């Protein structure tokens, strides 16, 4: 039926409401309007930063029109919704993406040009929103883009860190230095403070069971902190659907504590307000030493409690009984970081909604879904029981209760199997006892998934093996990761995107949302004209990268060389060390060549970028080695035309957008079985870069798609790893014997060829002794694979064919495919078209 207009005259309201801008004159009008009012500036002194802000505010207005309509639709129709809880959202820049998704990029470019600015300069003013460490946070950002593009009612929930991931500086000696990232300093036009959306979150205090025949308890006292919402609009691509990413900021509950003031305790009052604000002050670098840190645990609870309160309030507006919660709400846990949400929902259902235990547990286990992102044992979250007991006394009680009932049911299925009970308990014995968050996430969820086929198999056969035996295999699945082709092709590689549209003879609005259409490019690999265009675009992208490096670092790069790229968080398992040792090997080989031999060598430029966790000593030494090897190699007149090496500081989403389209070959060389998926591998391949990698993570599925003849694989396979490690421990063979080529490289480093002989010993010793990541086992085949890459690059025609074939077969890796798998097979959430 026709709804009654809420107040005043409908025609007056509607006549005054704005719509999305569609023509250049309304765009310039809104731009100038923001210069004049929001920014209170004048045309005379408007610089590029001001022009960026005016453009952003004007684009934001457009997004808000769609965002409002989307929200209204969700409220009216009350479909089942999904919520993506992630402690990290690595969004990067927004303006370009928003313009492309709105389909307004050309018009804005024309508009700002009329006003005397260039779009490129304006886009360059924006700081990255770097609220993430790496793949996990960037995956969350891609999933938001795909959800909105697929018109799915999905919201993200995260934290509004005042400081994102640290800025990386490299000292003259080659050491990584960390500086804070004050990304909000220039104001953030992309967020909407919602001071009206706020919740109180409690810490510490006492929990008393009521013992009234119900499982209820009362949690009182302690500290209360306020969570305030900031909304970030997430536009879908060529659709009105504009979803929301809600980020929480912590604030003291009162501006000041009157009692403390009255007692003359001014400092105490001010301090408590400081500690409240500290909760969302900084993103933690990916570093398992955070597991004991109270502030990190506070962040996790603060965020899950606020998000659940918000979700529950929205659910209650529908007016359905609480038992129907899972029919309207699906919550995806991105890794174990939000696992406390399981316990928090139990607390609400038991203590506030008066549900019996079994009914509460039924609701909870039908609501949550858990994605695992790593099987590395040291990276699995565990929290000390005493810390949890102190910070969240009621939650610790509930965890004990969940565990008791759970172990009872395990005992029932496997009577007398005490080992099994010990292995599966949510509480790990020890000093102190610790709560195993992955186990809690698993038993509290409806489904569990890994992020690539191999990884999902490993989850089932290693860390959660007992749980598969207990709960049945059907609870455990796989959703191979994906990437958004909007940012990772159209935005970062506009020329390639245009070539694809021209060739397919379809608007990018179509193929960007159905990436499997790229397959139609396959026959074009045989078309010389197309190949030449394809290769010319790669060349221009290499020149764009070279220009960027020239401008930012003052270095000149040989763009006729092959560009070889490895960019990711520094970690021993990702084996940047293998790569740099391979570079040294190449250097030593070149040094021993005659002038005649050198003529046949294919010039190569090797790029590294990535951050090391500040407390990760070995990873930092790897950076230092890379930087110092670069100094020697790049200055050596014997070799510098044939080999050069760059460590680009302060890796970011924006830097990746320049590096990825410029790569001829990229490296994804983790020890088999350690890289859950990897997602930059997909980005490089989508942009026509070839892949050099181990048989690990999503590399395997990429090879399945493009065919093994189009990738360069090397190294031992996952099933061999355990045995090799056993050999290292119990029957070690000296490196000199096992892998002379590697021994030679290590000895040269030890001898001081790259300076500071003694400095690198701890790094080299990780390989000489133990070699947990199997560099000595894979080095020879790695070198052989690098040689095959060189060989293949000599036949440029064949290389370009491989490049085209690779890109053409990347359809599977669109995050649109991945998000639809979550929506259909996990959440049971359907698209909602906003007319
Ligand atoms: C992690 C895994 C990657 C995976 C990504 C997203 C944690 O990212 O290690 O293999 O692709 O999650 O699922 P990263 O190492 O980049 O921080």
Image (cartoon, grey):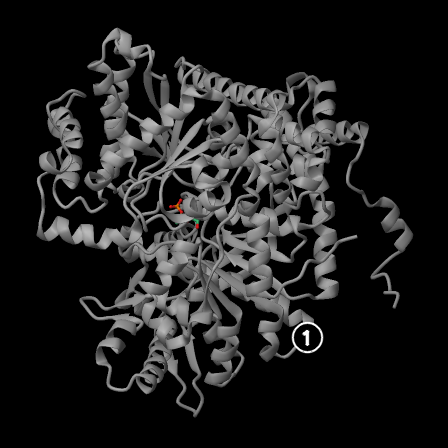
Picture layout, residue 95 above or below residue 262: above
Picture layout, residue 350 above or below residue 550: below
User: CB at mark 1 closer than 8 A to ligand 1?
Assistant: no
As drawn, which residue projects farthest toward the bottom? 213
- From the top left corner, tell me how far across and down residue 492 is, in percent: 56, 31
Residue 72 visible at all: yes
- From the top left corner, tell me how far across and down residue 263 is, in percent: 37, 61
Picture layout, residue 155 above or below residue 328: above
- Residue occupied by mark 1: 319
User: Who is closer to the viewer here, 252 or 487?
Assistant: 487
| Quadrant in the picture for the N terminus | bottom right
Q: Residue at x 71, y 42 (%)?
A: 238
Describe the element under mark 1 as helix, strand or loop: loop
Residue 253 visible at all: no
User: Who is closer to the viewer here, 580 or 119?
Assistant: 580
Q: Residue at x 54, y 19 (%)?
A: 540
Number of labels in the image equals 1
> In the drawing, does residue 45 fall left or right of residue 727?
right
Q: Residue at x 32, y 51 (%)?
A: 673
Q: Residue at x 41, y 66 (%)?
A: 441
User: Who is closer to the viewer here, 479 or 486?
Assistant: 479
**Rendering quarter of residue 699:** top left
User: Who is closer to the viewer here, 466 or 367?
Assistant: 466
**Rendering quarter of residue 61:** top right
> Label 1 crowding class (10 Å Cα cut-off): few <14, some 14-19, many 20+?
few
């Amino acid at each position: 039926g026709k709804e009654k207009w809420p107040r005043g005259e409908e025609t007056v309201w509607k006549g005054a409401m704005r719509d999305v801008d569609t023509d250049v004159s309304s765009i310039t009008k809104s731009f100038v309007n923001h210069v004049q009012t929001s920014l209170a500036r004048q045309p005379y002194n408007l610089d590029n930063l001001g022009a960026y802000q005016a453009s952003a505010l004007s684009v934001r207005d457009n997004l808000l029109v769609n965002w409002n309509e989307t929200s209204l639709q969700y409220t009216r129709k009350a479909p089942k919704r999904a919520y993506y809880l992630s402690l990290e959202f690595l969004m990067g820049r927004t303006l370009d993406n928003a313009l492309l998704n709105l389909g307004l990029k050309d018009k804005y470019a024309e508009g700002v040009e009329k006003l005397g600015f260039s779009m490129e300069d304006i886009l360059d003013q924006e700081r990255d929103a770097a609220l993430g460490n790496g793949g996990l946070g960037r995956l969350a950002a891609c999933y938001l883009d795909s959800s909105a593009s697929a018109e799915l009612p999905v919201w993200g929930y995260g934290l509004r860190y005042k400081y994102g991931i640290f800025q990386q500086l490299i000292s003259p000696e080659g050491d990584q230095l960390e500086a804070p990232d004050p990304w909000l300093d220039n104001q953030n036009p992309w967020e909407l403070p919602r001071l009206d959306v706020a919740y109180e979150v409690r810490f510490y205090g006492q929990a008393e069971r009521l013992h009234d025949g119900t499982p209820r308890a009362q949690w009182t006292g302690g500290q209360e902190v306020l969570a305030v919402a900031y909304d970030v609009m997430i536009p879908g691509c060529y659709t009105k659907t504009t979803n929301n990413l809600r980020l929480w900021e912590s604030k003291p509950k009162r501006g000041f504590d009157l009692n403390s003031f009255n007692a003359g305790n001014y400092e105490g009052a001010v301090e408590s307000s400081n500690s409240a604000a500290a909760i969302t002050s900084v993103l933690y670098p990916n570093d398992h030493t955070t597991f004991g840190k109270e502030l990190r645990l506070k962040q996790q609870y603060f965020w899950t409690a606020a998000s659940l309160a918000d979700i529950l309030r929205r659910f209650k507006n529908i007016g359905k009984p609480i038992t129907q919660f899972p029919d309207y709400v699906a919550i995806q846990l991105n890794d174990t970081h939000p696992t406390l949400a399981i316990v928090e929902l139990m607390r609400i259902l038991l203590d506030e909604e008066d549900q019996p235990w079994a009914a509460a547990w039924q609701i909870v286990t039908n609501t949550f879904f858990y994605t695992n992102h790593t099987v590395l044992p040291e990276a699995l979250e565990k929290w000390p029981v005493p810390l949890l007991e102190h910070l969240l006394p009621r939650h610790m009680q509930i965890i004990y209760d969940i565990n008791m009932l759970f172990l009872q049911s395990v005992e029932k299925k496997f009577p007398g199997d005490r080992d099994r009970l010990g292995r599966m308990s949510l509480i790990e014995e020890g000093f102190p006892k610790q709560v195993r968050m992955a186990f809690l996430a698993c038993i509290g969820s409806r489904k569990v998934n890994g992020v690539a086929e191999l990884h999902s198999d490993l989850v089932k056969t290693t860390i959660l093996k007992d749980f598969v035996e207990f709960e049945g295999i059907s609870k455990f699945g796989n959703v191979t990761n994906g990437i958004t082709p909007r940012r990772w092709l159209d935005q970062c590689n506009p020329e390639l995107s245009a070539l694809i549209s021209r060739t397919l003879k379809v608007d990018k609005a179509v193929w960007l949302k159905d990436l499997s259409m790229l397959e139609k490019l396959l026959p074009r690999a045989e078309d010389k004209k197309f190949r030449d265009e394809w290769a010319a675009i790669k060349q221009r992208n290499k020149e764009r990268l070279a220009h960027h490096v020239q401008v930012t670092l003052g270095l000149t790069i040989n763009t006729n060389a092959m560009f070889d790229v490895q960019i990711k968080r520094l970690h021993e398992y990702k084996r940047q060390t293998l790569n740099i040792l391979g570079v040294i090997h190449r250097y030593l080989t070149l040094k021993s060549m005659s002038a005649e031999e050198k003529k046949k060598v294919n010039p190569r430029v090797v790029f590294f970028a990535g951050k090391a966790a500040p407390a990760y000593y070995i990873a930092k030494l790897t950076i230092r080695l890379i930087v110092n090897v670069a100094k020697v190699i790049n200055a050596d007149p014997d070799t510098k035309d044939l080999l050069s090496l760059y460590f680009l500081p302060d890796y970011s989403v924006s830097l990746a957008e320049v590096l990825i389209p410029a790569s001829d070959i990229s490296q994804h060389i983790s020890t088999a079985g350690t890289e859950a998926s990897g997602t930059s591998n997909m980005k490089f391949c989508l942009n026509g870069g070839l892949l050099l990698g181990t048989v690990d993570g999503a590399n395997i599925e990429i090879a399945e798609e493009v065919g093994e003849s189009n990738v360069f694989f090397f190294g031992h396979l996952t099933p061999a790893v355990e045995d090799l490690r056993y050999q290292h421990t119990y029957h070690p063979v000296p490196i000199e014997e096992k892998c002379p080529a590697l021994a030679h490289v290590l000895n040269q480093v030890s001898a001081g060829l790259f300076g500071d002989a003694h400095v690198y010993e701890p790094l080299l010793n990780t390989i000489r002794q133990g070699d947990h990541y199997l560099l000595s086992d894979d080095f020879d085949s790695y070198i052989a694979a690098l040689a095959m890459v060189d060989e293949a690059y000599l036949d440029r025609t064949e290389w370009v064919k491989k490049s085209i074939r690779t890109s053409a077969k990347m359809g599977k890796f669109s995050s649109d495919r991945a998000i639809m798998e979550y929506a259909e097979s996990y959440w049971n959430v359907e698209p909602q078209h906003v007319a």
